[in-house]
Image: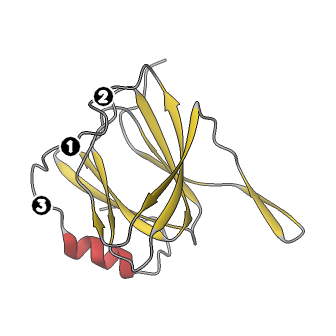
Amino acid sequence: MGLKSQVEIYSLESIKGGMAEFYTPQSSNETMLVQVPSGTVDDLFVHHFQTDQLFVVRGSFVLVVLQNRRYQYIPLSENYPAVVRIPPGVPHGAINLCHEPCVMVNAVLRHGPVCDRDYRPLKRPFDYDMAMARSLMNSSFHSVAAT
C-alpha cells in the first residue's frame, strides 16, 4: 500500500458523555504537543519519513502547504475539530497572527527513521499571501476553507 501524497482534512467524530465530549483517537507511533507562538510566520519544512496528523486543542492558526507550486492556506481552530493529515514530502509551515499561542496535538505516523533534514527550514519559492492568512485568521472559521 503506497502513501498518499496529498494533504487530507477531515472532521472528527465525537461522543458526548454527560458534560464531556470524547473525540475519535488518532492512531500514531508518537504523539507530540506543539505550540505555535503568537505572531509566528514560520518557514516551510518537510518530513521525509513521517506523516503529521494535526489537531488544534487551543487557539487557531493557518497551516500553509506547498503543493503543485501553489500555497494552500488551511485555517484550523479549536472551535471546529478537524484533523489535517500531511504526508511525507509535502512542504508546510504555520502562520499565527492571533494574540494568543495555538496549541495542537501531532499524532505522528513514522515510515522510517527520523531524518536530520526534517526540521531544517526550506527557502520559500515565493512569499506567503499574508492578506489571505490574515483574512482566514479574522474569519469565524465557519468551515475549514482552502484556497
Q: Which residue is mark 2?
A: 116
User: Residue at (45%, 35%) from the top-left corner?
Assistant: 51
User: Count the marks: how many?
Assistant: 3
Name the one closer to the observer, 118 or 81: 118
User: Residue at (19%, 51%) from the top-left corner?
Assistant: 70
Q: Earlier in the sequence, mark 3 or mark 2?
A: 2
Q: Quadrant of residue 116?
A: top left
Q: Secondary structure at mark 3?
A: loop
Mark 3–mark 2 contact, CB under 8 Å?
Answer: no
Disc ID at residue 89? none
Q: Secondary structure at mark 2?
A: loop
Marks 2 and 1, Cα distance to the nearest angstrom?
25 Å
Label 2 sits on what residue type?
A: Asp
Describe residue 17's horizontal placement relative to residue 107 as left or right.
right
Label 1 sits on what residue type?
A: Asn
The image shows residue 140, relative to residue 103, as above or below, that is: below
Where does residue 138 sit, x and y in percent of width and height? Answer: 37, 82
Disc ID at residue 127? 3
Q: Which residue is mark 1?
A: 68
